[in-house]
Image (cartoon, grey):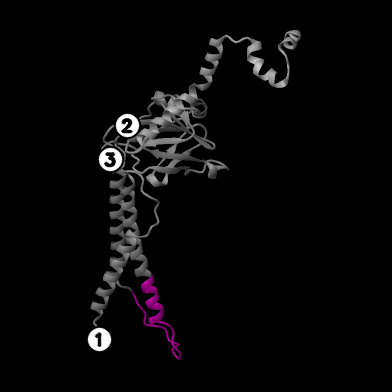
Amino acid sequence: MKIPNAIWTLLIGIVLTLTSLWYGQNHSLLPVAASDEAPLVDGLFNTMMTVSTGIFLIVEGVLIYAVVRYRRRAGDNEDGPAIEGNVPLEILWTAIPAIIVIGISLYSFDVYNNMGGFDPHSAHAAPAPMTESAMNMPGMAMAVSFSDKEPPVQVSQLDKKSDAVSKPAELTINVSGMQYAWLFTYPDNDVTTGELHLPIGKTVEINMTASDVIHAFWIPEFRVKQDAIPGRETHLRFTPRKAGDYDLICAELCGPYHGVMKSQVVVETQEAFDSWMQEQLLASKDIPNQAVAMNSMAMTADEFLSPYTQDMGIHSEILHQIK
């Protein structure tokens, strides 16, 4: 019994569709999703992977079929029949990619908008001065000197129109990128560190700039990335959801040691974050407190040097003679 070509085409189409759908959802190519924004990006990526897998299988399948079916046979030295054209087929293979591209474009726009998006009416409005927080970021004096010929503007990835970013930020952090390190300032506590600590479930707003060249703030597990630009303040908002240590990577070529420009991102419970913040506050006050304590004790030179001179076997009388 000969199976009609239409049935074969239907069966092959079903197999290709199921294979593409399965691989599009089970490719395991993405790192762990650790933020509220990550599933939005993953959904777009999975859709593109599904479509790409289907197109790949169709194209490669047709090529393999053509190589086997129309291979040169012994004793056959003639050319095949000339094909002048097939208008319906040409329309089909032009229309289908166009529909796919338009669909992915609309999906991409929706994902970007849900993650913060942009306002087409004000994204390129007249330049606005940087905020006071940006001017106080470490390295901004150098950045302003580099960009004094161009008025600074605000470039925001956040439009605050979607549910993902409609609520106000619960933690604000100023970030400064420089060759080849990141500095993080918590303005509410006046703490500056080289490691980014975030509490789980808190919406974080990042205000960033750069002190020398363009850098890019990228945390793969959060699926967020934003440029840090000298003389300009850019913004990023996200909500971490999984505890752990993650890498903050500079994704913009910024110099010969660009590859080592990484920092640690620690997502932890609110209690652990509060404890870490207290440690930073104590550490930042440690040196001034020591100076105040020493001054309040009004120690004499002999009293200050006594522990050291005793270890060296020097008596206080000798110190008086030296004076």
Q: In which quarter of the image is the N terminus?
A: bottom left
Q: In this view, does 35 lie above or below 19?
A: above
Kindly identify the residue that appears in the image at 39 percent across and 83 percent down: 80
Q: Is mark 1 on a helix, strand or loop?
A: loop
List x then y, in percent, for residue 166.
26, 36
List x then y, in percent, for residue 224.
38, 43
Q: Mark 1 points at which residue?
A: 2
Q: Is residue 3 above or below residue 108?
A: below
Of tags 1 and 2, which is closer to the observer?
2
Kindly identify the residue that appears in the image at 55 percent across and 10 percent down: 297
What is the span of residues highlighted in magenta in the rendered image?
60-84
| 113 within the magenta span | no
Can you tell which mark lies on residue 103?
none
Q: Identify the image quadrant of residue 124.
A: top left
Q: Mark 2 points at which residue?
A: 170
**Residue 35 as seen in the image, left or right of residue 78:** left
Quote the CA–CA distance across marks 1 and 2.
68 Å
Q: Is the magenta stretch mostly helix, strand or loop?
A: loop
Q: What element carries label 3?
A: loop
Q: Name the residue under label 3.
A: 164
**Residue 195 as seen in the image, left or right of residue 256:** left
Q: Which of 141 and 279 is in front in this view?
A: 279
Query: Could you tell which of marks 2 and 3 lies nearer the N-terminus?
Result: 3
Q: What element carries label 2?
A: loop
List x then y, in percent, for residue 70.
39, 82
Kind of residue indicated by mark 2: Glu
Q: How crowded is mark 3: few (under 14 residues within 10 Å), some or many (20 or more)?
A: some
**Residue 128 as seen in the image, left or right of residue 145:** left
Label tally: 3
Quote the CA–CA distance across marks 1 and 3.
56 Å
Q: How crowded is mark 2: few (under 14 residues within 10 Å), some or many (20 or more)?
A: few
